[in-house]
Amino acid sequence: MANRTVKFYKHYFLESFGDQTPQVRKKITQVLVWISHIDRLPVSIFKAIKTVKGLYEIRIESAGNIFRVVCCFDDGELIILFNGFQKKTQKTPSNEIEKATRLMNEYFKEKNHGEK
């Protein structure tokens, strides 16, 4: 059974999390706990973003709404959560992918330069 640490990078995810209803926050929390303990994650919950190497999305559905949390792995075990958003179309919006890519690059640059 996996034992991943869930780490939030700066304030990005927590701001979007705080904007959600209590029901949605509860569902997101349940999925994050589940992800931290399950070895093989189903594609219905956790999926690679094909256009950016190393970027993934956590897929959450609550009360008919679909939410995405963009993340990456660090040192093979650590999930870094960047931004969360409500998905309104089939395709993940390119501006969200661009934002997550920028934040992922920023995270690793800071880590490699000892700024964290």
Image (cartoon, helix red, strand yellow):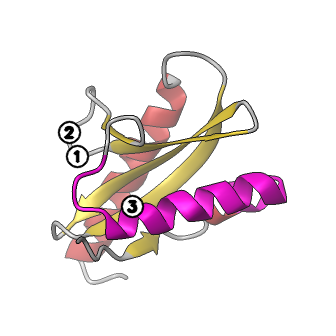
| Horizontal arrangement in the rendering, residue 14 relative to residue 92 (left or right) | right
Check if mark 1's residue and mark 2's residue have beta carbons within 8 Å.
yes
Say which amino acid is labelled 1.
Gly
16 or 26, which lies in front? Answer: 26
Q: Are there few (<14), some (14-19), or many (20+) residues within 10 Å of tag 3?
A: many
Labelled disc at residue 35: 3
The reply to whether the magenta stretch includes residue 18 is yes
Q: Along the line of sight, which residue is nearer the eye, 25 or 83?
A: 25
Q: Secondary structure at mark 3?
A: helix
Q: Determine the residue positioned at 51% across, 57% down.
A: 31
- Residue 76 in percent (x, y) is at 16, 66
- The amino acid type found where label 3 is placed reads Ile
Residue 99: say if magenta.
Answer: no
Q: Which quadrant of the figure has residue 45? A: top left
Residue 103, compared with residue 87, is above or below; it is below
Task: Provide the residue designation for mark 1.
Answer: 54
Mark nearer the viewer, 1 or 3: 3
Write the start and end of the magenta stretch as one range.
15-41
The residue where tag 2 is placed is 53
- Tell which of 43 and 18 is nearer to you: 43
